[in-house]
Image: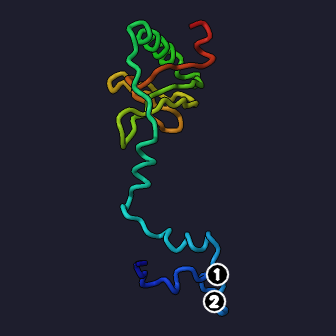
Amino acid sequence: MKEEFPYEDIVNLPPHVSERHPRPTMTERAARFAPFAAITGYEEMVIEEARTTESFIELDEMAIETINNKLNLLKSRIKEEPKVSITYFERDSKKRGGRYITANGVVKSINVYENTILMADNRVFEVKNILDIDGELFVNF
């Protein structure tokens, strides 16, 4: 004996097509669910986690000596308003590490007590974060 299925009379009917409301496209149907976010901030967290940072490079004694020699030369010729390129480490505010940036400009002063370089545009660079200093002044280095 065959078991009866309660909805057997409607299971194989074609889907209803409304004469008054046109069928939405797949994009329109998907858009109805798009505003729903189960976890607020999840997408931003994934993007932040995927963002990479660089590690700070510890300079050896020879590199430190080279930078100090360049700083001494800069200090002795500061009145000439030397143009330099300074590659420095900028720490990341959200994760461990940071990135190396090269900034160009004219050196205004060097503060030996605070170990900083002040540029003409008022940017300040800490000597401890400097990887390299380059410019026409250092052609013989």
**Against 64, is 108 above or below?**
below
Label 1 crowd bin: few (<14), some (14–19), many (20+), radius 10 Å:
few
Which badge, 1 or 2, comes first in the chain's sequence? 2
Total label count? Answer: 2
Q: In the image, is 132 to the left or to the right of 65? A: right
Screen quadrant of the N terminus? bottom left
Q: Residue tagged by mark 1?
A: 23
Of the pair 28 and 97, the residue shown nearer to us: 28
Instruction: Check disc 2 and report the residue beneath it.
Output: 18
Q: Give coordinates of residue 128: x percent, y percent.
A: 37, 23
**Residue 107 place in picture, x, y as percent:** 52, 27
Residue type at tag 2? Ser
Q: Is residue 107 above or below residue 37?
A: above
How far separated are the C-alphas under marks 1 and 2?
A: 8 Å
The percent coordinates of residue 44 (x first, y second) are 43, 53
User: What's the mark number on residue 127?
Assistant: none
Q: CB of mark 1 within 8 Å of CB of mark 2?
A: yes
Colouring method of the image = rainbow
